[in-house]
Amino acid sequence: MIEENYGHWHLDFYCDESDFYTSATGFWNEEGSWDVFFNEYSNDELYKLFGGFNYEIDEDFGVLIFKAKDYDEAHDKFVKWVNDVLLPLLKKK
């Protein structure tokens, strides 16, 4: 288990079949949970991919993709987000 309640951690996604890798970063917030950001692309590319959707884009941290109570929940949500949101958007690109 990863020590929580301060700092940050990284979430990784890798698919053997397509050799696709991406990651996100979780930051502890003042609400007592984690803000998880995706920042694998330049800000211009992030705006092109996510600008038309209801995502908050931070110039320093990237796209706020969700909040989570702990690492395990964040990991599960990230895998689902990559499969359901990111990969379909990249295919349209």
Image (cartoon, rainbow, N blue to C red):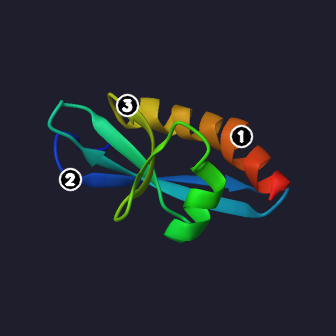
Of marks 1 and 3, which one's residue comes earlier in the chain?
Answer: 3
Give the image location of residue 80, x and y in percent: 63, 34
* Three-letter amino acid code of the residue under disc 2: Gly
Give the vertical position of 8 relative to 65 (above or below): below
Give the image location of residue 22, x and y in percent: 60, 59
Of marks 1 and 2, which one's residue comes earlier in the chain?
Answer: 2
Quadrant housing the C terminus: bottom right
Of marks 2 and 3, which one's residue comes earlier in the chain?
Answer: 2
Is 23 in front, or is 43? 43
* Residue ID for mark 3: 68
Give the image location of residue 17, x and y in percent: 85, 55
Q: How many marks?
A: 3
* Residue ID for mark 1: 83
* Residue ID for mark 2: 7
Is 49 in front, or is 11? 49
Question: Mark 1 near mark 3, Cβ–Cβ under 8 Å?
Answer: no
* Three-letter amino acid code of the residue under disc 1: Asn
* Three-letter amino acid code of the residue under disc 3: Ala
Residue 89 visible, this orientation: yes
Q: Secondary structure at mark 1?
A: helix
Give the image location of residue 3, x and y in percent: 23, 44
Q: CA distance from mark 1 to mark 2?
A: 27 Å
At 68% from the left and 47% from the top, the residue drawn is: 86
Q: Would you say 63 lies left or right of 7 here?
A: right
Q: Would you say 90 lies left or right of 29 here?
A: right
Quadrant housing the N terminus: top left
Q: Secondary structure at mark 2?
A: loop
Is 77 in front, or is 59? 59
Q: CA distance from mark 1 to mark 3?
A: 18 Å
Q: Secondary structure at mark 3?
A: strand
